[in-house]
Structure formats: structure tokens, C-alpha cells
């Protein structure tokens, strides 16, 4: 039996990410997909049968949910195009999920900024302690 390449799912995931980004840049025919849609990552199952595509949608909450519904509605077309482009024997089933990591990071950054402004500029800044060597 042939030995499997343990990195293949990662390589296929990257290729799927690139191909879906190209498809999105060309435009999606579903009118619900509005705003700026960015592919942030793809998780592939070990058997390459399922691809979970994480997207970030620059729009309001309602428009973000609508865009996600629209993307999941056109997922079969994405699946066939990805299968043809990557010449896969079986094209992976594609599901779209919102990537909340960017919003989470922005929220953490704003919280840190508010803590810095309430504590003053000198609080906790490196190099402000007289005991520290420069």
C-alpha cells in the first residue's frame, strides 16, 4: 500500500483557498453576497472530502449573515469549479463559515487601548522604570 503524504491536506487546503479567492474576485451570481468577502483560511478533512472555508465579510451583521447564506447556496458551483481546477478525483464538499478572529482581535485591541488611556501613558510602558537598564 502506498504511503500517504501527511502534508497533502494542507497543500490542497491552500490550493482550495486560492481558487475560491479567484472565484470570489470574479464575482458571485447570488445577490445576497455583498460587501467585501475575503477567504481567511480553509480546513480540509484528512480524506480531502470536506473543505471548511473561513471567510471574513466586511459588512453589517445582517448583511454578513445574508452573504454567508448566499455563499453556502452557491457552494455546489464552487465545488465543481474547484474540483476541475485542482484536478481532484473527488471534489471536496464546501461549507462556508464566518471567521470571527479578525473581529475578536479588533475588540481586544480596542479594549487594550481603552485600558492604556485610562491608566495613563506611562503605566506599564517598557523602559519607563528607573531600574531598567537601557
Image (cartoon, helix red, strand yellow):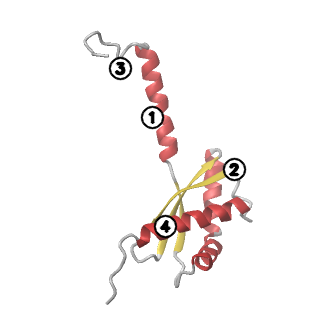
* Up/down of 102 relative to 88, above or below: above
Looking at the image, is mark 2 or mark 1 earlier in the sequence?
Answer: 2
Q: Residues within 10 Å of mark 2 (few under 14, many from 20)?
A: some
Q: Is residue 68 visible?
A: yes
Q: Which residue is mark 4?
A: 13
Mark 4 vs mark 2, CA separation in Å:
24 Å
Helix, strand, or loop for circle 2? Answer: loop
Mark 3 vs mark 2, CA separation in Å:
40 Å
Mark 3 vs mark 1, CA separation in Å:
20 Å
* Up/down of 78 relative to 35, above or below: below
Looking at the image, is mark 4 or mark 2 earlier in the sequence?
Answer: 4
Q: Which residue is mark 1?
A: 108
Q: Which residue is mark 3?
A: 126
Q: Residues within 10 Å of mark 1 (few under 14, many from 20)?
A: few
Give the number of the mark in front: 4 or 1: 4
The residue depicted at 67 percent of the width and 61 percent of the height is: 24
Helix, strand, or loop for circle 4? Answer: helix
Amino acid at each position: 500500500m502506498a504511503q500517504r503524504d501527511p502534508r497533502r491536506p494542507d497543500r490542497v487546503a491552500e490550493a482550495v483557498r486560492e481558487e475560491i479567492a479567484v472565484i470570489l474576485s470574479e464575482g458571485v451570481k447570488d445577490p445576497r453576497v455583498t460587501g467585501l468577502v475575503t477567504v481567511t483560511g480553509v480546513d480540509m478533512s484528512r480524506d480531502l472530502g470536506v473543505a471548511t472555508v473561513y471567510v471574513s465579510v466586511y459588512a453589517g451583521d445582517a448583511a454578513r449573515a445574508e452573504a454567508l447564506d448566499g455563499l453556502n447556496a452557491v457552494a455546489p458551483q464552487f465545488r465543481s469549479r474547484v474540483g476541475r481546477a485542482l484536478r481532484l478525483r473527488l471534489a471536496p464538499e464546501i461549507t462556508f463559515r464566518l471567521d470571527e478572529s479578525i473581529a475578536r482581535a479588533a475588540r481586544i485591541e480596542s479594549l487594550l487601548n481603552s485600558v492604556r488611556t485610562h491608566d495613563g501613558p506611562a503605566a506599564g510602558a517598557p523602559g519607563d522604570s528607573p531600574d531598567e537598564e537601557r
